[in-house]
Image: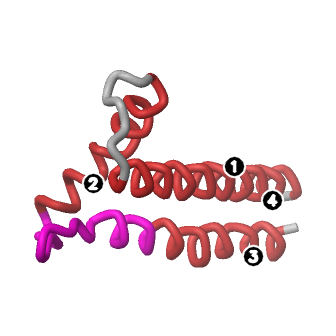
Amino acid sequence: MFLLANLLFAVAQVLDYVLWAYAWILLGRVVISYINADPNNPLIRFLHSATEPVLARVRAKLPLASGGFDFSPIAVWLAVMFLQRFLVRSLYDLAQTIS
């Protein structure tokens, strides 16, 4: 059973790192939306292509634009934080219980 516990621990840790990185990428996207960044810059294109598929789905499901502000990054950020606090923590606890 220790193999399954180690696998769950590893999955939880990788998922935690991926969610942490995505939260920072999302923050970068929000910051560049407030400045007049060059859309041909590779970093700007990366931030846009990494976040737009998720943000577009949230915008389609929940129209969160008000007064010219788009609140979909806040909804996605809250979802990422929820996944980190609930799913990752549950995987860690499950791995600890199994071992």
Q: What residue sits right under mark 3 in the picture?
A: 93
Q: What residue sits right under mark 4 in the picture?
A: 5
Q: CA distance from mark 4 to mark 2?
A: 34 Å
Which amino acid type is shown beneath numbered disc 3? Asp
Q: What residue sits right under mark 1 in the picture?
A: 14
The residue positioned 12% from the left and 75% from the top of the image is: 67
Answer with mark 4 or mark 1, whichever residue precedes in sequence.
Answer: 4
Answer with mark 3 or mark 4, whichever residue precedes in sequence.
Answer: 4
Q: Nearer the viewer, mark 3 or mark 2?
A: 2
Q: Nearer the viewer, mark 3 or mark 4?
A: 3
Which amino acid type is shown beneath numbered disc 1? Val
Residue 69's x, y, as percent?
Answer: 20, 69
Residue 42's x, y, as percent?
Answer: 45, 23
Answer with mark 3 or mark 2, whichever residue precedes in sequence.
Answer: 2
Q: Nearer the viewer, mark 4 or mark 2?
A: 2
Asked whether, in this view, residue 91 is left or right of residue 53, the answer is: right
76 magenta-colored: yes
Q: CA distance from mark 3 to mark 1?
A: 15 Å
Answer with mark 4 or mark 2, whichever residue precedes in sequence.
Answer: 4
Quarter that holds the N terminus: bottom right
Span highlighted in magenta in the image:
61-79
Q: CA distance from mark 2 to mark 1?
A: 23 Å
Quarter that holds the C terminus: bottom right
Asked whether, in this view, residue 35 is left or right of residue 97, the answer is: left
98 or 17, which is in the foreground? 17
Query: Which numbered circle lies on residue 36?
Result: none
Q: Secondary structure at mark 1?
A: helix
Q: What residue sits right under mark 2 in the picture?
A: 55
Above or below — where is 59 with respect to 46?
below
Answer with mark 2 or mark 1, whichever residue precedes in sequence.
Answer: 1
